[in-house]
Image: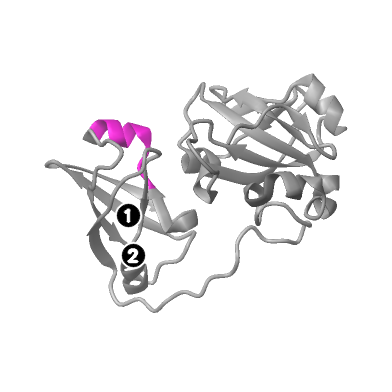
Amino acid sequence: MTLSRRFVDKVAICSSRLSSNNYFSVSAKDVEATDIEAGDQVRVVLIRTDLDGDIKPRDRAVYQNTLQKSNQIYVPKDARDKLDLQDGDIIKYIVIPKKAFPGVMDGPLRERFGDILEGSVGSDDETESQEQTRPSRDTTSAEFSASMQKTGQITVPKSVREDMGLIQGDTVLATIKWQGDDISANKDIGSGNRIIITKDQRDELGLEPGDEPTIRLAVFG
């Protein structure tokens, strides 16, 4: 899906580059079109630029932030990790002024972008995800193998989540094993019940999209 520059009900849609200090710039024209000023709160939707088809939940990150005096917006670590962003990467963004939040759900933005904004734009007291019921924990560790996507994402099987009592947002110690080598790191259970193997970790292990590494997860306490 290609997004070109358009403005729908004071919403800016364009592309930018992630800087080394984890900010992206909003052009002066975008700022003027959206009627926002430095210090204003905005809802941000970041979208990967290397998509081949429809935009899935794993391909976007949604958060609130503040427009800086230099027309820059910060990209938090959880958003960078979810999209596996590196310095200099090109990203597509949607910037929505806070004052527009209550009305965009039923307006032309919803009609044009549908699932991109599903669960991402609403009133201030609207949560980003639905409450999950935590299953009982039968074990503190489990091992599985699964195919890795090109973004480094691997889905944690339902049986593993149920046995370990895991829900989205939990942090686990993941040991990734591939061709005799392994790496251990803390990983968050993200949207779609996935963990992300970062680019540096993929490079170190020699992992390619479609490979099926062995993953051992452990929780403590």
> Is residue 23 found left or right of 33 in the rendered image?
left
Figure quadrant of residue 207: top left
> Is residue 48 found left or right of 26 in the rendered image?
left
Report the coloring of the rendering.
one colour
Asked if the residue at tag 1 contacts the one at tag 2, i.e. Cβ–Cβ closer than 8 Å, the answer is yes
Whether residue 214 is situated above or below residue 127 in the rendered picture: above
Secondary element at image label 2: loop
Secondary element at image label 1: strand
The disc placed on residue 173 is 1
Magenta part of the chain: 196-204
User: Could you say where residue 54 lies in the image, as x and y percent from the top left?
Assistant: 54, 43
Please name the amino acid that badge 1 sits on.
Answer: Leu
Nearer the observer, 119 or 178: 119
Please name the amino acid that badge 2 sits on.
Answer: Phe
Neighbourhood count class around disc 2 (C-alpha, 10 Å): few under 14, some 14–19, many 20 upward: few
Instruction: Tell me the residue that label 2 is attached to.
Output: 220
| Farthest left residue in view | 180
Magenta region, main secondary structure: helix
User: Could you say where residue 210 lies in the image, as x and y percent from the top left?
Assistant: 28, 42
Q: Is residue 197 magenta?
A: yes
> At x 42% / y 76%, what residue is drawn?
135
The disc placed on residue 122 is none
Neighbourhood count class around disc 1 (C-alpha, 10 Å): few under 14, some 14–19, many 20 upward: some
**Quarter of the picture holding the C terminus:** bottom left
